[in-house]
Image (cartoon, rainbow, N blue to C red):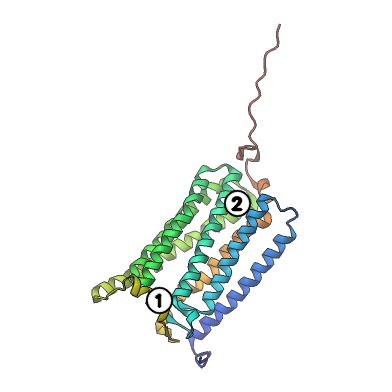
Amino acid sequence: MSFEWLAWSNPVALWWGFLLVVSAANIALFLLLHSHFRKGTLNPVRETIRFEILFLLCAAYVFGCAFRSVLPRADVQRIVLFDTWLSSVLVGRSVATVAEVCFAVQWAIVLRHLANLTNSDTARNISNVIVPLILLAEFCSWYAVITTSYLGHAVENSIWAVAFLLIAGALLRLLPRFNGIVQFAIGSAVIGISGYLLFLCIVDVPMYFNRWQADVTSGKELFGLLAGLHDVSTRWAVTHDIAQWKDEIAWMSLYFSMAVWSSLALCGIGLVKDRLPQYRTDPANSSPVNRRLPVRVKAGAG
């Protein structure tokens, strides 16, 4: 395995170095957050266990993205940086699938918790559809990598756009029900999601759709199921040429940095879960548990 390509003059080497630094920082930040969470956990109550699961899901996403940063690959093109079976699309896509489903479950858990705090049926209902949507997106992704049809990736990312549009809608519904730092955090999340949606609609989805159209025009032959599965597990081409990677650098850089930061931010809910109720705008009436029934006063005789 040659490392001669690791030079300051090679943009791909600089990009890979960026991915390594960001991934190391992400792992360190996760370990720090989890350490604070464990120190603040005194009783293994049901709610604490739920937030421990939130951290486990985050771990799968953080370490999964770190693995993909160390061994980047472009699925349909079958290009990699290192000649190893760990770089195969079969391994990389499997890791990505687990990580992305865990990320979706994180969002569902956090939305459900906030919905229960504020008795928001809208946020609760949206939390129920996030994971099924992402599972459908993963199916489309596997269709793309097995057949080498970019249409699968275009549909996959369109589904991600729908999922996060719904999440943004749920957060906007929750926004006026909190104040202070929690309201600021929810508002910041909406702004971040808006940027992500713009990227998907302007850059990502059109890129894959245009690639698909070009393949259709050229008469490219797609793989069938069995041939495609064999191909994703046995074929990869090592390249360190910026021309081969330039269209992948933008989304991978954002994915392995900002997307991971959002996963870490979701874990922040576990650190402040006990203080969240005090930031509700209407604590007495936000939760069914805290609602008080009207008291009937009977008129006295005489």
Label 1 element class: helix
- Residue of label 1: 232
Q: Earlier in the sequence, mark 1 or mark 2?
A: 2
Q: Viewer-nearest of labels 1 and 2? A: 1
Q: Nearer the viewer, residue 183 or 91?
A: 91
Residue drawn at x 60%, y 66% is 59
Residue 201 in view here: no
Residue drawn at x 50%, y 59% is 193
Which image quarter is the C terminus in? top right
Residue drawn at x 66%, y 46% is 277
Q: Position of residue 290 (x, y in %)?
A: 65, 37
**For the residue carrying disc 2, how many other residues have a C-alpha within 10 Å: few (<14), some (14-19), or many (20+)?**
many
Q: CA distance from mark 1 to mark 2?
A: 45 Å
- What kind of residue is marked 1? Val
Q: Nearer the viewer, residue 18 or 40?
A: 40
- Residue of label 2: 183
Q: Position of residue 175 (x, y in %)?
A: 56, 49
Q: Position of residue 297 (x, y in %)?
A: 67, 19
Rendered view: 17 above or below 52 = below
- What kind of residue is marked 2? Gln
Q: Left or right of 220: which side holds 42?
A: right
Please identify the quarter of the rendering in which residue 269 is found.
bottom right
**For the residue carrying disc 1, how many other residues have a C-alpha within 10 Å: few (<14), some (14-19), or many (20+)?**
many
Please identify the quarter of the rendering in which residue 142 is found.
bottom left
Q: Position of residue 19 (x, y in %)?
A: 54, 77
Rendered view: 294 above or below 134 = above
Q: Nearer the viewer, residue 34 or 161?
A: 34
